[in-house]
Image (cartoon, helix red, strand yellow):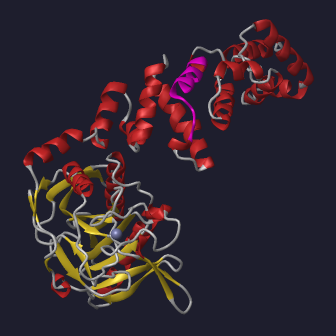
Amino acid sequence: MTQYEPVIGLEIHAELQTNSKMFCSCSADYSNAPEPNTFICPVCTGLPGAMPVLNKKAIEQAILVGLSLNCSINEFNTFARKNYFYPDLPKGYQISQYDLPIASKGFLDILDDTESPMRVVVRRVHLEEDTAKLSHEKNYALVDFNRAGVPLLEIVSEPDMRTVEAALSYATKIRAILRYLRVNSGDMEKGVLRFEANVSVRPSGSSELRTRTEIKNLNSFRALTRASAYEIERQIKVYENGGEVVQETLGWDEAHGVTVSQRGKEDAHDYRYFPEPDLPPLQLERTWIDDIKNQLPELPDAKTARFISDFKLTPSEAHLLTSEQTLASYFESIVANSKSSTKTIHSWIAGEFMRYMNDSGLALEEINLPAEKFAQLIDMVTDKTISGNSGKIVLNEMLKSGGGDPQEIVKVKNLAQVSDTGFIQEAIEKILSDNPKEVEQFLAGKETIIQWLMGQVARATKGKADPNVAKELLVKALEERRK
Ligand SMILES: [Zn+2]
């Protein structure tokens, strides 16, 4: 039986976070519009004679993205009309870039499914405008032009990915970079970041490129991976049954988990591209591009490498912390304020803190816990002022109340750890005399019972007994009963 290999390329559409739209001064913040069709003007609704004007900030953001993806920035840019009819496109064409995109020939290094590094070539990054938004009702559709004309960046990769996991890894990293650059919120539920996957399959080991299909409008990582995996299987079945894959545009039916044909694939010539007559070519100054280059923040790869070398973290620990720029700087602020080891600080963040974030559904920006307070708490556990368990209780208290002084919480909740052997000894003696059966079991060789007894000690001392001291005393007390 023939073994098949998937060939995947991604087109990523990202709305840019500018104040105004791509070609007019209407607000681009359409998700905060009071009503549909309020952030509109003659330009973005395509009224005859209205003239587009370029948004400088959008160009700057596009250059930032191009540089981050190791692209060449093209100093000479032109805009083109992409002609097609759809009710969400009032002009009957979209202003886009065709033969001269703003950035091209870049690459992004990712980790594939076996965690080995691989390079995906970025073919081009170009600027265009978003369409209006259609809401389909039962017998009619509604159109809202607030989104029409919002700056949109299209990032096109070569078909370099050979597994669904590699495609996911590439998409995840693009999202992280866009968020690092603060040019896109990455909020896929709001549709500000959308994927299109070009998928084909070929016999393993061959280098031919077979007919591909294009799955449009994938609005989540889950949809991207499920749709690609489904399409790979579907195409393999077509070949196995002696058929041919037809080039077409597909949609993803999330509810039924299948791809559905939307239309035969159009080629570029179907759009009748021609130069946009209302916008002169855009010549970028080299010095401006250099200025923008100087604004580039430290990007995920560089930050990960630095975290590994400076903080002695493993690659996976560093990856977790650098997945979000805000999380990485939060970690660094805690490190700067704490005497505890970076490993310890990482495990507090990766453990209890992220659990709270997941459970509460809050983003880091919404959590009001100053790094100095978190550092203070971690240090109290490190220097054994409180036990690890008490530390978790205090942390949750601080998270819920939005800050608070850890020392104060320890006092109020009476959580200070006790190494005073007399107090612990007393508790142990009482537990052993209250539980003769368990003591018997221990003496008969059931050593695991010690865990249960330690639990009793923790309960009796309300978690305040230093566990190392308690265990030592407990073992000693049990051994004494052997005599
Ligand atoms: Zn407008």
Vertical position of residue 56 compared to residue 384: above or below: below
Q: Quadrant of the C terminus?
A: top right
Residue at x 41% of width, y 75% of height: 145
Vertical position of residue 277 compared to residue 68: above or below: below
Is residue 38 at all visible to an observer of this figure? yes
Residue at x 33% of width, y 73% of height: 44
Residue at x 67% of width, y 37% of height: 400
* Residue 29 falls inside the magenta stretch: no
Q: Quadrant of the N terminus?
A: bottom left
Q: Looking at this rendering, what residue extends furthest in the front direction?
A: 49
Vertical position of residue 102 compared to residue 111: above or below: below
Count the marks: how many? 0
Q: Position of residue 301 (x, y in %)?
A: 28, 42
Is residue 444 at all visible to an observer of this figure? no
- Name the foreground residue: 432 vs 70: 70
Q: Position of residue 340 (x, y in %)?
A: 49, 19
- Name the foreground residue: 465 vs 252: 252
Residue at x 57% of width, y 36% of height: 368
* Residue 378 falls inside the magenta stretch: yes
Which segment did they paint magenta? 367-380
Q: Position of residue 45 (x, y in %)?
A: 34, 77
Q: Position of residue 469 (x, y in %)?
A: 69, 13
Quadrant of residue 248 within the rendered picture:
bottom left
